Image: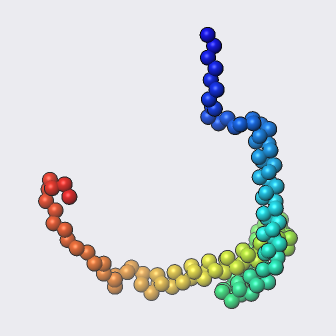
Amino acid sequence: MIIQNNRMQFGRVPGGGLGCLIFAVLLIAAGYYILKGLYFLLWWAAPALLVLALIVNWRVFPRTITSWLDTLEARPVHAVVQAAFAVVAFPFFALWLFLKAAGTRQADRIQRQFRENPSGQDEYTDYEEIDSKPGSGV
């Protein structure tokens, strides 16, 4: 007697390799159109993002240039690739600068708060003592 097992096995995909190939092509096409739309939106928002980055934390620009010059001395090919990316993907670079400015501003604010009150010794926490008896279950 022959017993057939029609249950789906772990790791098996319906459609086999062809189904995976079709899914991969659709996923790549969707990613392309999403990035294309994001690039178009950021292209128009890039000047505003640069101005906002200047307003939020202007020190990001000199730090980025200094970092790029240091990379140019240490690894020139890597620095040229970075510069090419900054030119070709300018809208994404502008978004990165804005996010970096916002992040460094928040980090500076947290560091300043820590310097003002490093150990938190001036703050007391309210607590209440609870009587507990062994074996009471509470």
Q: Residue at x 42, y 81 (%)?
A: 118
Residue 53 is situated, as x and y percent measured from the top left of the image, at 70, 84
20 or 92, nearer to the observer = 20
Quadrant into which the C terminus falls = bottom left
Colouring mode (rainbow / by chain / secondary structure / one colour)? rainbow
Please provide percent x and percent y for residue 57: 66, 86
Residue 104, picture quadrant:
bottom right
Q: Is residue 122 left or right of residue 138?
A: right
In this figure, what is the number of numbered marks? 0
Classify the position of the N terminus by image quarter.
top right
Decide which of 28, 125 is in the foreground and name it: 28
Residue 99 drawn at (x, y percent): 67, 76
Residue 127 position within the rendered picture, expressed as x and y whole percent measured from the top left: 26, 75
**What's the residue at 81%, 60% (across, down)?**
32
Q: Is residue 66 visible?
A: no
Q: Is residue 45 visible?
A: yes
